[in-house]
Image: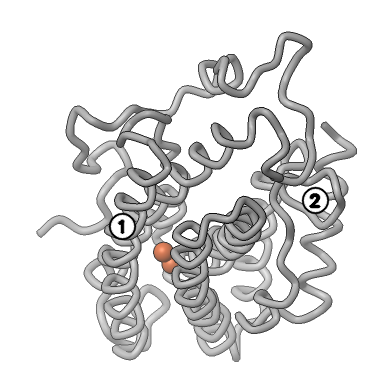
């Protein structure tokens, strides 16, 4: 079987819609007559809240598929060994466990999207998670996917869980809560393997953390994620701590988010 599959080789049937940045920004579901939807926390009283929540949930759903595909590829793409391009066998076991979790999340997400009134492909699929999972360096791959993107998933799940609670929807609330618990484990795997595999190689660790910073900045763009009141996705300090982030690292993500907002 082929190693290091490209993002354009992902198997998708006709139900899925590829991502188009321009179409996303002009999507009438998110653009008010006076301009783009106002920034701010996702709360049930916002008129655009149902569409925003459905779009976020669809984003989670395609993210779950790509997380499954990425973790599966990581089991296959690398050989077991001590070389720079090899991985320990235990890392593959963690990735295999992650595949099982992500497959379950795909099923939960399909059913939850249906509950929320969304069809597969109603929103476009952004493939950035799988693109990060194509990195040929296993340490960069795990840092980009498990720490940066699944770290973002922690923030999104936590925000959606709060939204489910605020809108009296226990199905949304508990589905998000269950998936959140698994994501904390996946981010912790990323934190642990980054630490273990770069123990004697500070340069490799610095490169991996820089890669994570680039991905984190991308998702803080325009104030999308942060810890201020006008960030739709709230940075979740508590769950990030459980996932192996130090206070300094969380402060840094909050700073990146403020910078990205200022630049926007
Ligand atoms: Fe997941
Ligand atoms: Fe995950």
Q: Residue furthest right?
A: 262
Q: Picture quarter containing residue 19?
A: top left
Question: Neighbour class for label 2 at 10 Å: few (<14), some, many (≥20)?
Answer: many
In the rendering, at what x and y percent does residue 130 appear? 39, 50
In the image, 26 versus 113, the foreground residue is 113
Q: Determine if residue 137 is in view.
A: no
Horizontal relation, residue 182 to residue 44: left or right: left
Asked if the residues shown at circle 1 and circle 2 are in contact, with their CB atoms under 8 angstroms apart, the answer is no
Q: Picture quarter containing residue 239?
A: bottom right
Q: Is residue 215 above or below residue 24?
A: below
Residue occupying image coordinates x 48% and y 67%: 174
Rendered image: mark on residue 257: 2
- Quadrant (top left, top right, bottom left, bottom right) of the N terminus: bottom left
Question: Neighbour class for label 1 at 10 Å: few (<14), some, many (≥20)?
Answer: many
Q: Residue furthest front?
A: 168
In the image, 77 versus 262, the foreground residue is 262
Q: Residue furthest left?
A: 1
Q: Earlier in the sequence, mark 1 or mark 2?
A: 1
Q: Determine if residue 68 is in view.
A: yes
Residue occupying image coordinates x 15% and y 55%: 2
In the rendering, at what x and y percent does residue 8 appear? 29, 36
Q: Picture quarter containing residue 147?
A: bottom right
SS at mark 2 in the image: helix
User: What residue does disc 1 label?
Assistant: 106
In the rendering, at what x and y percent does residue 50 appear? 56, 36
In the image, 247 versus 212, the foreground residue is 247
Q: State which mark lies toward you, 1 or 2.
A: 1
Labels in figure, total? 2
In the image, 92 versus 80, the foreground residue is 92
């Amino acid at each position: 079987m082929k190693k290091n599959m490209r993002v354009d080789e992902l198997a998708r049937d006709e139900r899925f819609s590829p991502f188009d940045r321009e179409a996303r920004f002009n999507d009438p579901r998110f653009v008010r007559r006076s301009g783009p939807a106002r920034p701010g926390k996702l709360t049930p009283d916002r008129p655009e809240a149902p569409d925003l929540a459905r779009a976020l949930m669809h984003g989670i759903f395609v993210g779950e598929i790509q997380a499954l595909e990425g973790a599966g590829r990581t089991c296959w793409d690398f050989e077991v060994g001590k070389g720079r391009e090899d991985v320990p066998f235990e890392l593959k076991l963690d990735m295999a466990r992650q595949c099982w979790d992500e497959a379950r999340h795909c099923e939960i997400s399909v059913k939850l999207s249906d509950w929320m009134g969304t069809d597969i492909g109603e929103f476009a699929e952004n493939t950035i998670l799988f693109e990060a999972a194509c990195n040929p360096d296993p340490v960069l791959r795990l840092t980009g996917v498990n720490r940066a993107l699944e770290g973002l998933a922690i923030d999104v799940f936590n925000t959606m869980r709060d939204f489910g609670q605020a809108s009296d929807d226990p199905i949304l609330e508990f589905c998000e809560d269950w998936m959140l618990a698994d994501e904390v484990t996946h981010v912790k795997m990323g934190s642990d393997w980054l630490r273990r595999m770069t123990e004697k190689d500070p340069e490799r660790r610095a490169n991996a953390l820089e890669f994570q910073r680039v991905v984190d900045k991308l998702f803080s763009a325009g104030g999308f994620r942060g810890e201020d009141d006008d960030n739709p996705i709230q940075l979740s300090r508590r769950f990030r701590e459980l996932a192996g982030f130090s206070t300094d690292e969380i402060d840094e993500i909050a700073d990146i988010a403020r910078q990205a907002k200022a630049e926007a």
